[in-house]
Image (cartoon, rainbow, N blue to C red):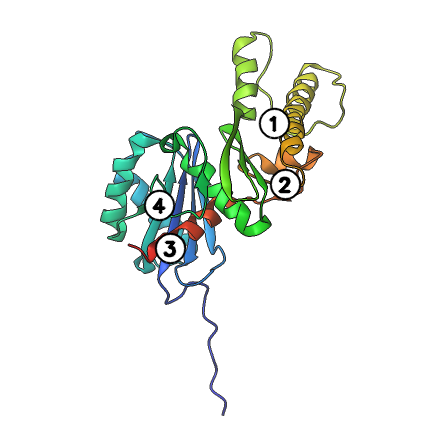
Amino acid sequence: MQKKVEKRKPGEGNPLLLALDVGNTNIVLGVFEAAGSSPLLASWRLATSRERTADEYGLSVLALLRHQDLDAHQVRHLVISSVVPPLHPVLETWARRYFQAEPLWIEPGIRTGLKIRIDNPSELGADRLVNSVAGIEKHGVPLIAVDFGTATSFDVVNEKREFLGGLIAPGLKISAEALFQRASRLPRIEIAEPERLIGRNTVQAMQSGTFWGYVGLVDGILDRLLAELPGAAIVATGGLARVIAPASRHIRHIEPNLTLEGLRILWALNHGAR
């Protein structure tokens, strides 16, 4: 009688890597197998809160892992990029208390494979660096990475793998919220592609102006960047990438998990030296 072979669940029995992208609005978490070029096993999005304690973050993450049938005891490694410095000591405590691990922080001095050609490398946001590394891995150089987050960043890497810098614009949600707060008769609106260009009421007019105005901002910046880097691959990520990028004349690649995949790449690049 042939012995039945049970199929192994993704991640079962292997050490896991937990990656965190800590932004001003959300914390995005992802789990990979630590060995090799593992695909993303699971990901989640939490609201960023400076008031939340290490235990509150710990219990939330343990619940998310259980819900996905992932064993928290297999999480042996952590990698974190963050643009919220007040949360750093909280997350250090969280990592040690709940996973008995020292996280790898994406910060100046780690190995990236890029030459940083900006005035002050220490001020470069970790997420911008991570996105560039992952974008190159997937689409080569030259590269323009567009991250639709709280702010929208455009990051540029040339054919020599030199990070040249970029542009940072107010995010779409910030722009829409400012319109609501500063104009007393205008309502708060949903951010989505409108059904028609010319709005027939106030809400439709606001949606159309906000959406197409932002698409115009994105394509206007990309027009100028492509004039300096002809043929550059353009990759979009971030919470609103799926909303704005399809309407762009230039964006062809949408990678929702670009930052998490960049964290995995940088962890693998630096883990051997630790």
The three-letter code of the residue at mark 3 reads Leu
Residue at the far front in the pictured view: 160
Labels 3 & 4 near each other (Cβ < 8 A): no
- Say which mark, if any, is on residue 17: 3
Give the Cα separation between the discs numbered 3 and 4. 18 Å
The three-letter code of the residue at mark 1 reads Ile
Q: Nearer the viewer, residue 40 or 272?
A: 272
**Nearer mark to the viewer, of 3 and 4:** 4
The answer to which of marks 4 and 2 sits earlier in the sequence is 4
The answer to which of marks 1 and 4 sits earlier in the sequence is 4
The answer to which of marks 3 and 2 sits earlier in the sequence is 3
Q: Secondary structure at mark 1?
A: loop
Residue position marked by numbered label 2 in the rendering:
232
- Residue 71, by quadrant, is bottom left
Q: Residue at x 53, y 51 (%)?
A: 137
Residue position marked by numbered label 4 in the rendering:
110
Q: Residue at x 56, y 51 (%)?
A: 138
The three-letter code of the residue at mark 2 reads Ala
Labels 3 & 2 near each other (Cβ < 8 A): no
Compared across the picture, whether 43 is left or right of 206 comes to left
Residue 242 lies, in percent from the top left, at 61, 38
Residue position marked by numbered label 1 in the rendering:
191
Labels 3 & 1 near each other (Cβ < 8 A): no
Q: Secondary structure at mark 3?
A: strand
The answer to which of marks 3 and 4 sits earlier in the sequence is 3
Give the Cα separation between the discs numbered 3 and 1. 34 Å
Within 10 angstroms of label 4, few (less than 14), some, or many (20 or more) residues?
some
